[in-house]
Amino acid sequence: MIILVQISILPHQLDDKEYLFKEGLLKAKLKETEVGEWRIRKRSIDARKKPVKLQVQLEFWKTGERRLDLPPFKPQKVSGDQEIIIIGAGPAGIYAALRALEAGIKPIIFERGKDVRERRRDLAKINKEQNVNPESNYCFGEGGAGTYSDGKLYTRSKKRGNVLKALEWFVHFGADSDILVDAHPHIGTNKLPKIITAMRETIINQGGEVHFDSKLTDFQVENDRIKAIQINAEKWQPCEHVILATGHSARDIFYLLHDKKIKIEAKPFALGVRAEHQQALINQIQYHGAQDNPYLPPATYSLVEQVDGLGVYSFCMCPGGIIAPCATHQEEVVTNGWSPSKRNNPYANSGIVVSVEPKHLPNYKPDNPFVSLDFQKMVERKCWEAAGKTQRVPAQRMLDFVEGKTSTDLPKTSYQPGIVSVNLNDVLPPMIAIRLQKAFIVFGKKMKGYLTNDAILHAPESRTSSPVSIPRDAKTLEHIHVKGLYPCGEGAGYAGGIMSAAIDGINCVDAIVEKIKVV
């Protein structure tokens, strides 16, 4: 029988295993001779008051009992007897392929972008030459947006699937086992490429296929059933099961579906700016004045407020991080953030965004699936124009933005292509800018020192989630009108991050397995 207990400790006590063991025994009311094995199950920071503490959950096995560590991933060799076509090699697509291997089904992945090694060259061109490759960038390519945008694995989607299983697969392919313990697990952009490569090599070694520079360009649908897909406007691939895991930025897929009379819908999303502070300031605020405690990680924050009927909240907070250029076309500007595994850069950044419902937008019509997407595109292009039609971003000091003053100078920023001083109140739609102004005032009261002119705002943070959803049957997970087509992950509106996308990929394969069994 497993016995779980939770203890509260000071940060420096985490490395004292003897102390943890004794405190756990005391809490569990056990004697040392009664325990055979034990381990840390979960840990989290409790910074609600001073002193900052860690909440640690311990697992004990009584003497004579054994901890069973089953293999987390059990692939089979596969052939072409049963196949699943997977469009997209992001977390949803890769995890779908891995689950297919477990089920004895051959996965065939088509990815429009390049592998992780080749992607690096195109990312360098964006940062150094401000040249965006529309097929290979921070959003498109092996591993999807998650590979080069942080690797945070926290999710609230516990009801969607087996979170622990998804985490264990990451560890199996090279991630640090700490992600199984931390309340907010994080791999780091510097470590993810090697893990993604190991996943791809396993898929191929077990008999699956992975094709790069292979863009979905058409569907063939007969009698409301998927029959074939076209790659690169040339090759047609017959198919019965297609998992569509193209991510939230594959706008051409939305247009293709609409042109083929396959139903899509406008959905809520969020849009705003990416705010950057000195990490030392965030540490000082969150840790009650303690800036340099070697036993505490760089501090994070989470903020939310209702402003004039809409939610304004922090999104994808990156301690010790970098702001990255995430446009997928040349004539747009998009920001996102990421952190290396050590989170040791001097800056902290976070999206601060306003939730947007399609009905709130100009030109809203119930039958227009592109109203949210059009709004998103409009803001991204306007920011591109405001910054001189380059991959630099329009930027403003935070207090200047709140007070409506153009910043006369700008501090150093982690955004490599560069920034341009712009009054963001003239660039962002009023429904966004006014709510952000009010929210920053409230956030400054919640976190004393957060509202400062030393913080810099970068615009826009616009790819928080897909502005379009692809409706599917809640039970079969197939498109509501096209059998054999499985909308999946963030791009279809069924995930919001690496973990929930990975779990949705697994769920789609499970639905296909169930269907095959029935047949």
Image: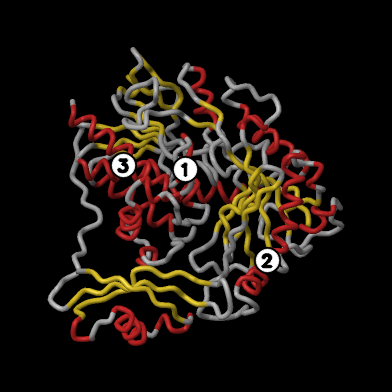
Q: What mark, if any, has residue 141 been given in the picture?
A: 1
Q: Which residue in the protein does label 2 denote?
A: 447
- Between 100 and 184, which is closer to the camera in this rendering? 184
Image quadrant assignment for residue 43: bottom left
Expressed as whole percent of the image width and height from the top left, the position of residue 333 reads 67, 42
Which amino acid, mark 3?
A: Ala
Which amino acid, mark 1?
A: Gly
Mark 3 residue element = helix
Outermost residue, top side: 223
Question: Residue at left 56%, top 49%?
Answer: 123
Q: Quadrant of the N terminus?
A: bottom left
Q: What mark, if any, has residue 259 been given in the picture?
A: none
Which amino acid, mark 2?
A: Met
**Label 2, label 3: how far apart the Cα atoms are:** 43 Å
Expressed as whole percent of the image width and height from the top left, the position of residue 41 reads 34, 69
- Between 46 and 120, which is closer to the camera in this rendering? 46
**Label 1, label 3: how far apart the Cα atoms are:** 16 Å
